[in-house]
Amino acid sequence: MKRISMNDVGLDNKRFWTCFFLAEWQNAYNEQKDCSVADVIEANYPDLSDYYEWWHNFTGYREDIFETSDGYLEEPTTLIAALDEEQTLKIEFHPGDTVYFINETEIGCTGPHNAIWCPLSYDAIEKLLNVSHGEALYFLLLPMTKLDFQIQSDIEAARTKIESLLRKIFATEICGNLADCMMCALTEE
């Protein structure tokens, strides 16, 4: 296993985060604006070939990976990080999937089957902003979250928080559209 730490996925690692958002939010689509996370990123960063090459190296991609193992590696790039004194996050980055675990229990994945078995509450994710590497942990776990807010002001507060934090990674002018697409995915049934 190629083990990485939170230092490897700091918000200043533009290649990681750009590719992470392209991979993890591949189904985040805003019907009203007829755009997805990928549409927004690709329109504003037209030459991503260097980023894709970096991501392929990061995930261990090779030409035959889908034919030989359906996109999974026995020894994937793996992030292990403490969430608190009792919980440890593990994320396996395979060429064809990203698999999430808390305390060795699989909570979901974002690959072709895109399933969340144990959705995390937005409140729990937001509390991570107060810990070391909190903003990175917030974005890493946000794909495993479903918003179940009934009050429009709570939904809008979450959207505003996401947009604000996205500005630490992406150009300000695209963060609103990215946040809108992500909110569509986070609030869909």
Image: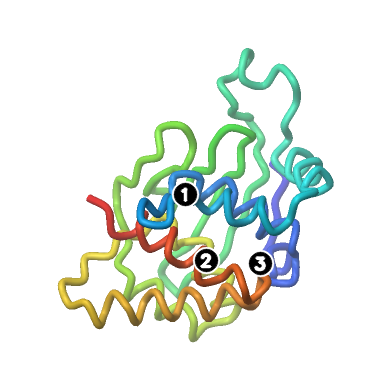
Residue type at mark 2 is Phe
Pinpoint residue 2: horizontal percent, then vertical percent. Answer: 73, 45
Disc sitting over residue 178 in the figure:
none
Pinpoint residue 75: horizontal percent, then vertical percent. Answer: 66, 35
Task: Specify the quadrant that holds the N terminus.
Answer: top right
Circle 3 SS class: helix
At 71% from the left edge and 17% from the top edge, which residue is drawn? 64
At 40% from the left edge and 54% from the top edge, which residue is drawn? 30
Q: Is residue 96 left or right of residue 12?
A: left
Disc 3 target residue: 6
What is the crowding at mark 1: few (fewer than 14 residues within 10 Å), some, or many (at least 20)? Answer: many
Circle 1 SS class: strand
Q: Quadrant of residue 15?
A: bottom right
Disc 1 target residue: 100
Q: Tell me if residue 53 can be seen.
A: yes
Mark pair 3, 1: CA separation: 15 Å
Pinpoint residue 141: horizontal percent, then vertical percent. Answer: 46, 61
At 40% from the left edge and 71% from the top edge, which residue is drawn? 125
In the image as oriented, which residue stretches furthest toward the front?
33
Residue type at mark 1 is Tyr
Circle 2 SS class: helix
Q: Are marks 2 and 3 in contact (CB under 8 Å)?
A: no
Mark pair 2, 3: CA separation: 12 Å
Which numbered disc, 2 or 3, marks the residue closer to the eye?
Answer: 2
At 68% from the left edge and 62% from the top edge, which residue is drawn? 5
Disc 2 target residue: 139
- Closer to the N terminus: mark 3 or mark 1? 3
Q: Is residue 51 left or right of residue 186?
A: right
Q: Quadrant of residue 170?
A: bottom right
Residue type at mark 3 is Met
Residue 98 vertical placement versus 185 (above, below): above
